[in-house]
Image (cartoon, rainbow, N blue to C red):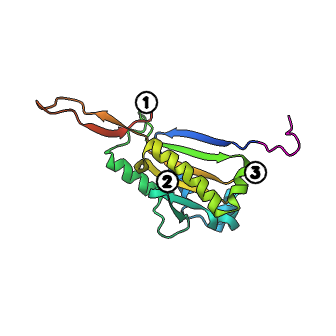
């Protein structure tokens, strides 16, 4: 039913969560807008359903460790693929063979968005959209650990502002195998989508 006169409709937030065995370069470059030019925007808009706006590309930003703000077109931006590979190396994770039937998800790609009108209203003011982004960043940092947030990019150049979050899912697992007498099993951080 239609809302009553002077009654505000409720805004909503959405999450689209995809576990991925491997994160492909195309998706990571799109999330970080790495190397995008005006020609890239023109090419992207040739695909049905795409509505990218080059004139708003300079407003795209990311939150980095500590919830720090940085524009995506900043020359200090570290490519997402480089960050992902560094975190996987820290965890001593090696991809399974291409045809493996039991390969774990090594990353989770999450799109955070919401009601079109509300998101556009937030995007009119950097303070508001940054506050929304920081609240979401803090939620993911609490849930998955800040070290596991590979990227948190906010796209202002599409029809509805939204964020792309790339996370490495980890869990603490007790060490397997024999342990010397008097020692305890150590917990090790490992890739674990299920946990």
At horizontal 58% and vertical 54% (from top left) the residue drawn is 133
* Count of numbered badges drawn on the protein: 3
In the image, what residue occupies the spot 52% across and 51% down?
Answer: 137
Query: Where does residue 98 sit, x and y in percent of width and height?
Result: 42, 39
Q: Which residue is mark 2?
A: 151
Magenta run includes residue 68: no
Which badge, 2 or 3, is on the more N-terminal residue?
A: 3
> In the rendered view, does 97 fall on the left or right side of 28?
left
Q: Nearer the viewer, mark 3 or mark 1?
A: 3
Magenta stretch: give its range. Answer: 1-9
Instruction: Name the element at disc 3.
Output: helix
Q: Which residue is mark 1?
A: 101
Q: Nearer the viewer, residue 120 or 166?
A: 120
Give the mark nearest the N terminus, 2 or 1.
1
Q: Which residue is mark 3?
A: 117
- Please identify the quadrant where the C terminus is shown: top left
**Foreground tag (2 vs 3):** 3
Q: Distance of mark 2 from mark 3, alpha carbons? A: 25 Å
Could you say where residue 102 lies in the image, as x and y percent from the top left? 41, 30
Q: Is residue 120 left or right of residue 29?
A: right
CB-based contact (under 8 Å), mark 3 and mark 1: no
Task: Name which of mark 3 and mark 1 comes first in the sequence.
Answer: 1
């Amino acid at each position: 039913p239609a809302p009553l006169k002077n009654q505000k409709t409720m805004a909503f937030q959405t999450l689209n969560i995809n576990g991925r065995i491997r994160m492909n370069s195309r998706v990571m470059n799109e999330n970080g807008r790495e190397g995008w030019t005006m020609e890239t925007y023109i090419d992207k808009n040739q695909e049905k359903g795409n509505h990218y706006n080059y004139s708003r590309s300079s407003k795209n930003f990311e939150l980095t460790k500590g919830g720090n703000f940085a524009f995506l077109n900043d020359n200090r931006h570290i490519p997402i693929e480089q960050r992902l590979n560094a975190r996987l190396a820290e965890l001593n994770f090696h991809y399974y063979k291409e045809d493996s039937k039991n390969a774990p998800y090594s990353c989770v790609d999450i799109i955070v968005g919401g009601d079109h009108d509300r998101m556009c209203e937030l995007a009119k003011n950097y303070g508001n959209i940054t506050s929304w982004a920081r609240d979401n960043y803090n939620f993911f940092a609490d849930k998955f650990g800040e070290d596991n947030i590979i990227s948190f990019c906010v796209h202002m150049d599409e029809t509805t502002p939204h964020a792309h979050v790339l996370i490495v899912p980890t869990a603490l697992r007790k060490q397997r195998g024999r342990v010397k007498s008097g020692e305890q099993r150590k917990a090790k951080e490992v890739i674990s989508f299920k946990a």
